[in-house]
Image (tube, rainbow, N blue to C red):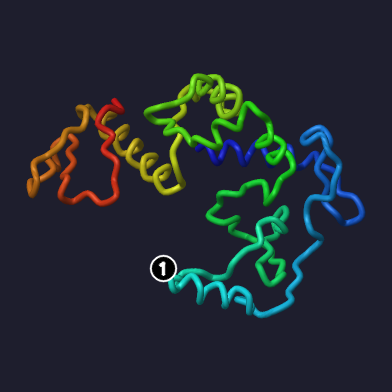
Amino acid sequence: MAFLLLSQRVACSSQKNLFISGSRYISQAAAKVDIEFDYDGPLMKTEVPGPRSQELMKQLNTIQNAEAVHFFCNYEESRGNYLVDVDGNRMLDLYSQISSVPIGYNHPALAKLIQQPQNVSTFINRPALGILPPDNFVDKLRESLMSVAPKGMSQLITMACGSCSNENAFKTIFMWYRVSFGARAPTLTPPHSDPSYPSVQLGYNLEQCFSTFLMLHTF
């Protein structure tokens, strides 16, 4: 939900940006700068992975299994929707990493935020927001995500990644559905036991759980 809200807000803001001479520019209102941000298009210089990436793969493979690596990136030269690899190939990144770069690489507005002193502590210390949030956490949520929340939605749960966000969203839906039929709050069942189905009471079997959160206090 957090990613969706941010994407909607960024999309609305992006529509107001100017397009001049085929190049994309960041509006002065958003970033207080007027610089060329995005590339005009892809530019391929070698096959992918290129020779430099292949050499780095060999080096990495002496330390860890590098079979999953597609190529090595030059993030300093990547801009907007274009990812540049270490061989100078400029590619349109349709995935944005794992959908974790919704407004493009090296966005000047984000670069400016990172450089602000009040944000340095958060980036350095990377607090565990679920158990040890900073003193300005509530204000940050109200000013950012809650300010663009759909009407009628007054609660927000932040997650660490897309997988846990989707997982917990589905769990919450399942819990709401069962509770709407008179079910009680979920409980744990003993190992190797029937999780009380088709009883109206929800149950979790710990032995059958894999990479799972147990949200026992949601309701």
- Left or right? Give the position of 8 relative to 79: left
Q: Circle 1 is placed at which residue position?
A: 64
- Left or right? Give the position of 16 relative to 6: right
Where residue 22 sits, quadrant-wise, is bottom right
Q: Where's the C terminus, which quadrant?
A: top left
Q: Residue 128: horizontal and vertical position, in percent?
A: 42, 33
Tally the marks.
1
At horizontal 85% and vertical 54% (from top left) the residue drawn is 23
120 shown above or below 212: above
Where residue 7 sits, quadrant-wise, is top right
Three-letter amino acid code at disc 1? Gln
SS at badge 1: loop
At horizontal 86% and vertical 49% (from top left) the residue drawn is 19
Nearest the viewer among 30 and 66 is 66
202 shown above or below 212: above
Q: Residue 177: horizontal and vertical position, in percent?
A: 30, 35
Residue at the farthest right position:
21
217 shown above or below 23: above
At horizontal 66% and vertical 62% (from top left) the residue drawn is 74
Q: Residue 155: horizontal and vertical position, in percent?
A: 46, 24
Nearest the viewer among 26 and 15 is 26
**Crowd class of label 1 (few under 14; some 14 to 19; many from 20; radius 10 Å):** few
Q: Residue 184: horizontal and vertical position, in percent?
A: 20, 27
At horizontal 62% and vertical 63% (from top left) the residue drawn is 73
Where residue 132 sits, quadrant-wise, is top left
- Left or right? Give the position of 89 relative to 176: right
Nearest the viewer among 16 and 110 is 110
